[in-house]
Image: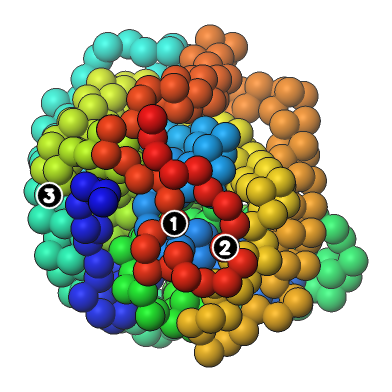
Amino acid sequence: MSNTPVREVWSSRTVFLAAAIGSAIGLGNIWRFPYIAYQNGGGSFLIPYVIALVTGGVAMLFFDYAIGHRFRAAPPLAFARIRRWAEPFGWVQTLITFFIAVYYMAILAWAAFYTYYAATLAWGDDPDKFFSQEFLQADTAHVHTGTFIPGLTVVLAILWVVLLLVMSLGVEHGVGAVSRYAVPALVVLFLIITVRALTLPGAAQGLDALFTPNWSALLDPTVWMAGYGQIFYSLAVGFGIMLTQASYLKRRTDITTTAWTVAFANSCFEVMAGIAVFSALGFMAQQSGAAVGDVVSSGIGLAFIAFPKIISTMAGGPFFGVLFFGSLFLAGFTSMFSIIEVPISACMDKFKWGRKKAVVVVGSTAALFSLVLLPTTTGLATLDIMDRFINVFGIVLIALLTLVVVGWGAKMFPVLSRHLDARSTIRTRGWWTAAVGVLTPAVLAVTFFGNVKELLASPYEGYTGPQLLTYGWVLAAVIYTAALVFTFVPWHKDTDFSLPEEFRNEENTPPVENRAH
C-alpha cells in the first residue's frame, strides 16, 4: 500500500475553470495581443491567430491537461511516472515558473502603485520621465546597484505575503475561492473600460488601424509564427502551469471540453482588450494630431507610459485610470496563483511536505529573490532581460523538448489520446497527434532558433554584456543545471511512481517503474 497522501481536487468544474481562465488571462492579453495583431496584418491576423489557437493552443492544452490528469502530479513526478528518465523535463518546467514568479510580482507592485497614482494623475505631464526616472529611478547600465526603492520594496513584500496566505489555504479554499470572484470582477472591469474607450473621440480611427485587414501579410511566414507565439504566450501552455492545475481535476472530468472553454475565454478577452486598447490609442492619436501607428506601443511602455498619457487627457481620466490599472493588477494576480503553484506542488510531491511548509519554503525563497533583485534601480533592466531569456530558453525550448522526447520518445501521444477520448465529449481523433506531434514542434523549433539567432546577433535592447550574461545566459544555464540536481535528489521513500490507481485498469497502459528505491 502506498502512503502517498490523497491529492487535493477542485470541488467542481466551475471552480477549476475560474482558476484556469484566471491563469490564462494575464498581462499578455492586455498589453501584447493588440500590438501583435496590429503589426501582423490587423484584421487578417485573426485568421492565423484562430488557426494557431486550434492547432497549437488547444492541442497543447490537451497535452498538458492529459498528463496532469492521468498522472496526478506536478511536472517532475508526472514525467517520472511516464518514464524515470523524463523527470528532468519536469524540473525545468518547475524552475521556469519559479523564476517567472520572481519577476512577475514586481509588475503587480507597479500596477498597484499606478492604481493609486491614477486617482490624482500623479505622473504629471511627462509619464515617460515619471515612470523611468521618478518611480523606478531606472539604471539600465549596471548589473545591480544595491539601491532599493523603499516604497516599492514594502509594497512588493506585502503582495508576497498576501499571495502566500492565499496559497497556504489550498487549491480549493485559496486559489479557487479567490479566482471564483476575481475573474468575473476582472471581466466586468474590462467591459466597463472597453465601453468607455469606445465612446472616446478617435476610437473609430484606432479600431480601423487594428482591424483593417492586410491580406498580403498572410503570405508572410513571420505573421503565422506571430500567431502561434501569441497563443503559446497567452495560454501559458507547455511549461507546467496547466499540467499542474489539471492534476487536481476529478477523475470523470470532460477534459477536452474544458480545454476548449479555457482557450475560447482567453481569446475573447484578448479581442476585447484589443478593442479597448486601440480605441484609447485612436483617441490619443487624435489628441496629438498623429497617426495611430505613431502612438502604438506594447508591453511595459503601453501600460505605464502610453496609457497614463491617454488617461491624463480624457474626461473622467482618473476613474478610467483606476479601472485600467486595477484590471491590470487583477489579471496579473490571478495568473500568479497558478505560476507559483507549480514549484509548490512539485516540492509537495518530491519531499512529501504539507502544503503550508511547501508554501513557506518555496514562497519565501521566491520572495527573497524578488525582493533582492526587482525593487531596485536596476530592477527594470533585470526584469526585461529575465523575461526575454526565460521565454526563449525556458518556455519555447522546454515545450519543444517535451513534445519530442516525452511525446514521441516515450510514445505518449497515443496513450494520452486514448485517455482524453475515454472521458471527453470532443474527441481527439487523428488531428490532435498531427497538430501536437508534428506542427507544434516545427513551429517551436523555428521560433527557438530564430530567437537565438537574434540574441546572438546583437545585445538585447542594448543592455551591457555583464547584464545579459548574469540575468540571461547564466539564468538559462542555472535552470537546466538545477533541474539535473533536483533530479538526483532522492524522492521521499513513500513516493509511488506507478500510475494512479483509478487509471490502472485502462487498456494499453504504458509500462511504468513502480517504487522510488
Figure check: 259 above or below 159: below
Q: Can residue 87 be seen in this view?
A: yes
Mark 2, secondary structure of its residue: loop
- Nearer the observer: mark 3 or 2; the answer is 2
Classify residue 230 as left or right of residue 176: right
Mark 1, secondary structure of its residue: loop
Instruction: Name which of mark 2 and mark 1 comes first in the sequence.
Output: 1
Q: Categorize mark 3 by other alpha carbons within 10 Å: few (<14), some (14-19), many (20+).
A: many
Labelled pair 1, 3 in contact (Cβ < 8 Å): no
Tell me the kind of residue under disc 2: Thr
Instruction: Name which of mark 3 and mark 2 comes first in the sequence.
Output: 3
Instruction: Name which of mark 1 and mark 3 comes first in the sequence.
Output: 3
Q: How many marks?
A: 3
Q: Which of 304 and 310 is in front in this view?
A: 304
Q: Mark 2 points at which residue?
A: 509
Q: Categorize mark 2 by other alpha carbons within 10 Å: few (<14), some (14-19), many (20+).
A: some
Task: Identify the mark at residue 168; answer none if there is no mark.
Answer: 3
Labelled pair 3, 2 in contact (Cβ < 8 Å): no
Q: Name the residue under label 1.
A: 499
